[in-house]
Amino acid sequence: MISEEVLVKSIKHSLGVLRSRIEILVPTALCQIAETVGHDARQMYASFLQTPQDDTLDLCILLRSAGKTYVVSGDLVRGGSGDVLSEMGPMTFSEQGEETEPFEQRICQYILEQEDTLVQELRAGTGTTT
């Protein structure tokens, strides 16, 4: 049975995996993982920063509950300008549903698909600001 807390734990773990991978590929990048909770949704995000002068790159994952179904969606956004670099299509999970692939793997893959774009953007920011 899938619960909201299990999904939150899986999303946070996957963001941590992404952070670790980015730190290996772009050792100078900094990352902060945080969460905000609203009345109808939870947002977990990882903010990446190459230098203090650069805009952050924010991978925002939104978790909404709709009855016995949970919807996970996300965007990769440039923090200062709000430019959307990548829009991630929604994934749905049912409390009672039979998953053919473990949902933890689906969430991790969903988040790690943003790795290449993050690395490219972080490397492009290196040395380009004054």
Image (spheres, rainbow, N blue to C red):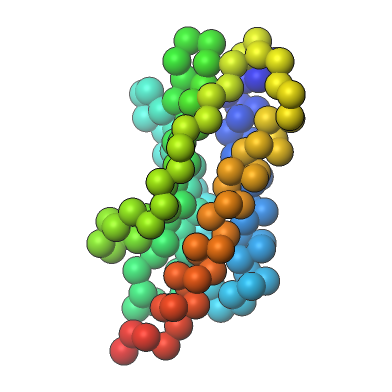
- Vertical order, 27 against 103 (above or below): below
Counting from the top left corner in percent of width and height, residue 66 is at 45, 15
* Left or right, residue 81 beside residue 9: left
Q: Is residue 111 left or right of residue 44?
A: right
Horizontal and vertical percent position of residue 15: 59, 50
Q: Residue at x 36, y 23 (%)?
A: 39
Image quarter hosting the N terminus: top right
Residue at 41% over, 78% down: 125
Give the position of the C terminus as an image quadrant.
bottom left
Q: Nearer the viewer, residue 43 or 72?
A: 72
Instruction: Say if 41 sits above or below 75 in the image.
Output: above
Residue 78: image location, x then y, percent: 35, 61
Above or below, 31 against 125 in this view is above
- Residue 95 placement: quadrant: top right
Total labels drawn: 0
Whether residue 15 can be seen here: no
x 58%, y 33%: residue: 8
Residue at far left of view: 81
Which quadrant of the figure has residue 119?
Answer: bottom right
Q: Residue at x 47, y 48 (%)?
A: 45
